[in-house]
Image (cartoon, grey):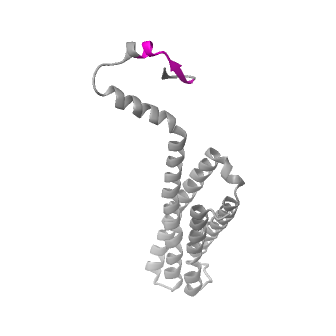
């Protein structure tokens, strides 16, 4: 018996029917196994694609969250009016790209959770989601700071922003450790 793919799934098929449709040529067997492999691993493949895009947009999000506070440091050091205007434009543009990276990282993360809802019952995922919520709060605070700089209302020193710049690194370390080690 051979397995036949139909609209309703995989079903056994008599050998006579398989022989009657078998094409001639050497490509039949490899193509058949490739098709079966694709059908069998469709769910796993979907999850791998979701994880890959989730990681790509995490990198994009963190790139913005690492560099945006560095722009705050430079702007807080009291540059000339010309340079300050440039920093305001750079902050705004980087913030927009960071929004896209963050939104897509979260979207692909939620899609991954919908594909594998069993992860929500694990303690490490609860801790990771708590840290992601903290990262979103950090991102929202960055939006507020960009607004303060745009309105020339910054009251913080460059030293504050140097320490503020280290916060996303702590989030990154903890989130990656939880996701890779799954300690509980």
**Image location of residue 58, percent across then percent down:** 53, 60
Which residue shows up at 66% across the image and 59% down it?
125
Confirm whether the magenta stretch covers residue 6: no
The span picked out in magenta is 9-18
Asked whether 180 or 131 is in front, the reply is 180
Image side of residue 5 versus residue 118, left or right:
left
Which residue shows up at 56% across the image and 59% down it?
102
Image side of residue 24 versus residue 84, left or right:
left
* Relative vertical location of residue 41 with respect to residue 5 in this rendering, above or below: below
* Relative vertical location of residue 139 with respect to residue 71 in this rendering, above or below: above
Task: Classify the position of the C terminus by image quarter.
Answer: bottom right
Is residue 10 among what the camera can see?
A: yes
* Relative vertical location of residue 39 with respect to residue 23 in this rendering, above or below: below
**Image location of residue 69, percent across then percent down:** 54, 75
Which residue shows up at 51% across the image and 86% down it?
77
Where residue 34 sits, quadrant-wise, is top left
Is residue 151 among what the camera can see?
A: no
Where residue 23 sits, quadrant-wise, is top left
Which residue shows up at 58% across the image and 82% down it?
163
Q: How many numbered discs sit on the rendered protein? A: 0
Where residue 181 sits, quadrant-wise, is bottom right
Asked whether 126 or 25 is in front, the reply is 25
* Relative vertical location of residue 83 with respect to residue 131 in this rendering, above or below: below
**Image location of residue 117, percent across then percent down:** 67, 47
**Image location of residue 71, percent across then percent down:** 50, 76
């Amino acid at each position: 018996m051979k397995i036949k793919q139909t609209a309703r799934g995989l079903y056994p098929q008599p050998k006579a029917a398989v022989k009657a449709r078998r094409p001639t040529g050497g490509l039949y067997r490899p193509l058949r196994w490739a098709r079966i492999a694709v059908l069998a691993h469709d769910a796993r493949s979907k999850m791998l694609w979701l994880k890959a895009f989730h990681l790509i947009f995490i990198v994009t999000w963190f790139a913005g969250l690492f560099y945006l506070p560095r722009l705050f440091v430079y702007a807080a050091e009291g540059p000339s009016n010309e340079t300050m205007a440039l920093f305001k434009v750079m902050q705004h543009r980087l913030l927009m790209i960071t929004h896209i990276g963050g939104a897509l990282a979260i979207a692909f993360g939620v899609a991954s959770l919908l594909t594998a809802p069993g992860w929500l019952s694990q303690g490490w995922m609860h801790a990771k989601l708590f840290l992601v919520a903290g990262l979103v709060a950090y991102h929202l605070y960055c939006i507020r700071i960009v607004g303060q700089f745009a309105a020339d209302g910054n009251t913080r020193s460059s030293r504050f922003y140097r320490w503020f710049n280290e916060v996303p690194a702590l989030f990154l370390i903890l989130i990656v450790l939880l996701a890779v080690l799954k300690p509980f």
